[in-house]
Amino acid sequence: MPYFFHEQDALLHLQSATTSYVIKLYASGLLGNVYWGPRLSEPQDLSSLIGLRDKRVGENPSTVDYEHQEDILYQEYPSGGASDFRPPAFRVIQADGSALSPLRVDLRPEHSHRHTPGKPALPGLPGLWCSTEDEADTLRIRLADALTGLSVELQYTLFRDTGALVRSARFLNQGTEACYLTRAFSLSVDLPPGEFDVIHLAGSWARERHIIRQPLLGGTHLVESTRGISSHQENPFIALAEPSAQEESGLVYGFNLVYSGNFSALASRDQFGGIRVLMGLNPENFRWKLESGESFQTPECVMVLSRTGLGGLSRTFHRLYRDHLIRGQERQRPVLINNWEATYFNFTEDKLLALAQEAAAVGIELFVLDDGWFGHRDADNSSLGDWFEDLRKLPRGLKDLAVKIREKGLQFGLWFEPEMVSPDSRLYRDHPGWCLHVQGRHRTEIRNQLVLDLSRAEVREALIHRVSTILTEVPVSYVKWDMNRALTETGSAALPPDRQGEVAHRYVLGVYEMMERLVSAFPQVLFEGCAGGGGRFDPGILYYMPQIWTSDNSDAIERLKIQYATSLVYPLSSMGAHVSAVPNHQCGRISPLETRGNTAMSGIFGYELDLGALSAEEKELVKKQVAFYQEHRRLIQTGDLYRLKSPFAGPRNPGNETAWLIVSPGKDRALVFYARILAVPNPGLAVLTLAGLEGAFTYRISGKTSYTARGEVLMQAGIRLPPLWGDFQSALWVLEKV
Ligand code: DGJ
């Protein structure tokens, strides 16, 4: 029984196979956070936990008036404005103008909380799910402000196998007057004092999600996006790791928000060294009106605890997301060719068919027609919104092209950027008010385009209708859903002045509604998310689309960092990874085709170049790469990842080598990837120590060096690296249990 209520001590204990989370209902009605850590057994007396969090229990156990002592308590969902001076979890501006909403729980057991097996879905929002009710337990705790009638229901779902905890909050205005929600985090956790590093994933276009790790000393560390999308610049992920924590050792707490818009994550030290972590919607420019009787649901946030370092943290996230977030995870992902870097906007039907022919000859399974097939789009300055094929480029139409491509034995895929409009488009001329804007103000164009106001139902309907018509008329098996700019002047012509602070979140809800309706209406279509590469690589999108284009940067060496860091949270099965031409179009680097292939194979594999421009020898290699990926894709898409060498330079790591290993759930197969960036003259003997194998198994190793060895030898002593000549070299080995 993974949920326990210790009535006498007013302790709620959520227990998984590996973790426990314990909440205290204080007599004052405040909700205390008393334990998040490795599993505690039951039955046992847990009252000593309270003493560890409550300075005064030892001094005077009968004094429990905490109404004015909030600053010393470890809390679950702290209100601001009273005596807790740490950052609050929420803020409501009441009808009297105050920002005070002291929340208290109704202590009667039948009123304080509710336990149900399984996990309910959040209406209109992406979230984790269970296949059967025995996979998770959900606890709901209701807090209320007696004076105004505001109440908040906190929802906790603990997944029984991984120990991951998913939290969210729902606000309900049961008062008679309207109020404004200006801050509504999905979770707050107070952790006891300790030395920790903060880890987050930061970057920019073409260099998304690089790992940043720095000590959390005093003050508040903020990770956020204000761009309307989760962003290239920061990912909605934050971790606190013991300074000594490494890949396979040490304590790490990880937090990931299931949301694709403005977010913030804070880690804040208090006066005693304790740490408050908050994560959720970004309060910046957020102001949500709650009329009497209205409710507001926050997105959910995932909390993962690892005692086995960053590797353990990642494997828990991967397993959780593969089993409980990504829908369509199990579907076979075809090896694709995308025409973008092969042709950009400059294509004809003949050019596309020639590329498809080359692709079919090397065993590729899916042909993707990228940007430029609609309106009169010969550059990025027109036609977004006009989703009608350009008969100058495709004189016999899209359907005819798709049929011809299918006749070559390939599936057909198509690019859309549904959320956008070009000022030079029929759609914009007909509906100039349909984009996000503020009346009388300049409309900032980025990449010559504006963002459609998806908070408006009629805009969503028009887009769903157009995209659905194409997906119905044309035999499309795959859609790349792109999104190429941030939100600016985030106002809506359809909302009153006192609701303009809602637009950014309503936009994201609109995107989710569109995605939900389209993916449900076309279950046979494989959707891939994209936002100028990896500008919206988050669990919100993964709920709708099982894969995301990881970055526009497909240079194999840059991808070492991007894919390594993305894997901190997201499974390899979610990362689109393509082989592209050299010199690379994003940074000019020339790397061997072998390394480009080896790197891209640790993801959802494809090509994005003019295959016709390759030599016969290169085409032979491409054919082998495609066949190799097809043989091992199940392992890559479902295996456990062990990172062995980091491309990020540190005091003890020059960052010249990258390595990881993917091992099957039964540990009978594994794939080892190794890359060396710059050549090392006279390197001497080099060895790579493996991890994650079964020590007692004997493995046949095949690759640049081939032999047989026991798992224990491979993990304790390692494998010998082959001599590599030149820069940007790599190797792959397949390990099979003998
Ligand atoms: C940005 C994407 O990331 C690219 O792959 C490509 O689809 C372009 N947009 C097309 O405009």
Image (cartoon, rainbow, N blue to C red):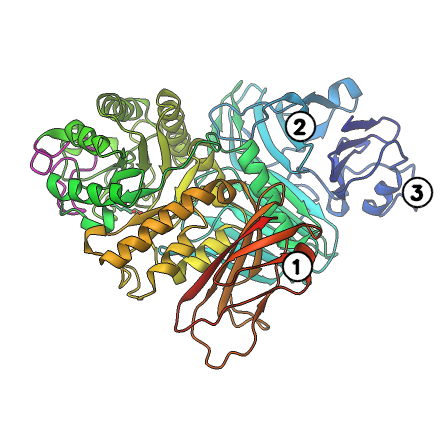
Prevalent SS, magenta region: loop
Front disc: 1 or 3: 1
- Kind of residue at disc 2: Ala
- Kind of residue at disc 3: Asn
Q: In the rendering, at what x and y percent does residue 206 appear?
A: 35, 56
Q: In the rendering, at what x and y percent does residue 162 appear?
A: 66, 38
What label sits on residue 60 in the rendered view?
3
Q: In the rendering, at what x and y percent does residue 7 appear?
A: 85, 26
Instruction: Tell me if residue 717 can be seen.
Output: yes
Instruction: State left or right for residue 210 relative to residue 335.
Output: right
What label sits on residue 715 in the rendered view?
1
Label 3 Cα crowd, 10 Å radius (few <14 / some 14-19 / many 20+)? few
What label sits on residue 411 in the rendered view?
none
Q: Nearer the viewer, residue 376 or 216?
A: 376
| Relative to 266, residue 23 above or below | above
Q: Secondary structure at mark 1?
A: helix
Q: Contact (CB < 8 A) between labels 2 and 3? A: no
Q: Secondary structure at mark 2?
A: strand
Q: CA distance from mark 1 to mark 2?
A: 34 Å
Q: Nearer the viewer, residue 311 or 463?
A: 311
Magenta residues?
A: 374-395
Which residue ends up furthest to the bottom in the rendered image?
Answer: 682
Q: In the rendering, at what x and y percent does residue 511 appear?
A: 37, 31
Find disc 2 in the rendering and name its residue: 136
Please give the name of the residue rendered at 57% of the width and 56% of the height, measured from the top-left corner: 643
Q: Nearer the viewer, residue 603 or 298?
A: 603
Please give the name of the residue rendered at 54% of the width and 36% of the height, measured from the top-left corner: 322
Label 1 Cα crowd, 10 Å radius (few <14 / some 14-19 / many 20+)? some
Q: The N terminus appears in which quarter of the rendering?
A: top right
- Looking at the rendering, which quadrant does residue 246 occupy? bottom right
Front disc: 1 or 2: 1
